[in-house]
Amino acid sequence: MGTSLPDPSSEGEVSIRCFHHEDEHNSCSINLKTGLWVCHASGIGGNLRTAIEHISGVSSSEAQKIIDDKGVMPTVVESKTEEPDKVIDEAISKIYERNLASDRNRRHEAIKDFGWSDEAINHFGIGWDERTQRYTFPIRNRAGELVNIRMYDRHSSGENKMISWKAGYGTGRLWPMTSLVADTLIVCASDDDTPEICSMAVLRFPPMPDA
């Protein structure tokens, strides 16, 4: 490609200008561990052989011959053993729920400023953490186990606006799973829109665990 690659991330990813089309930005990602690449602008991707096809304009068999002549060995991707979820005591989420129920000012803010209804707050188990001064959202896996508690602060920005309960509990983030079973998916502009939008779907879709 006539260019040197930048230092990869911990996952082996590098971003470069795509070799498949005229590119002014680093729209192509290459994983140096798997040998796979994808252009996020065009949606085209593949492996080393397909990359050589695009760059050199050769056939698939000719591209493979170039790889063989260079002595490039195929990448072997090791399979990862999925670790069981860390489970949080349900009593902790209940404490947060009681905190919000007993804090008149916080509940008034949730209802008046965010537009959350009592039905939405109760149905989704939204609570309040006094220590972090954040609203809490319980996250469950498909087995219904509490695997994370997302904590929301409207005054923060970026990734700090919605954080996980503690370090090591950030795998489960989708909330709630009921929003993913509809024929039409609604993308909310902000975190505080989600509870009320989801509460509108409670009567349409049967409840199921989060994930």
Image: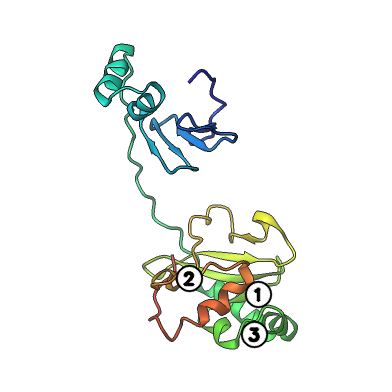
Q: Secondary structure at mark 2?
A: loop
Q: Which amino acid type is marked by label 3?
A: Ala
Q: Residues within 10 Å of mark 1 (few under 14, many from 20)?
A: many
Question: Which residue in the protein does label 2 denote?
Answer: 176
Q: Nearer the viewer, residue 106 or 59?
A: 59
Q: Which amino acid type is marked by label 2?
A: Pro
Percent x, y for residue 171?
A: 49, 55
Q: Residues within 10 Å of mark 3 (few under 14, many from 20)?
A: some
Percent x, y for residue 41?
A: 50, 43
Q: Which corner quadrant of the image does residue 9 belong to? A: top right
Q: Is residue 86 above or below residue 30?
A: below
Q: Residue furthest top?
A: 69
Q: Nearer the viewer, residue 29 or 143?
A: 29
Between disc 3 and disc 2, the foreground one is: 2
Q: Which mark is residue 128?
A: 1
Q: Residue at x 43, y 72 (%)?
A: 184
Q: Residue at x 61, y 71 (%)?
A: 136
- Quarter placement of the C terminus: bottom left
Q: Secondary structure at mark 3?
A: helix
Verify CB contact (< 8 Å) between mark 1 and mark 3.
Answer: no
Q: Which mark is residue 101?
A: 3
Q: Nearer the viewer, residue 100 or 6?
A: 6
Q: Earlier in the sequence, mark 2 or mark 1?
A: 1
Q: Image check: 87 left or right of 117?
A: left
CA–CA distance between discs 3 and 2?
A: 21 Å
Q: Residue at x 61, y 76 (%)?
A: 127
Q: Which amino acid type is marked by label 1?
A: Trp
Q: Earlier in the sequence, mark 3 or mark 2?
A: 3
Q: Residue at x 63, y 72 (%)?
A: 192
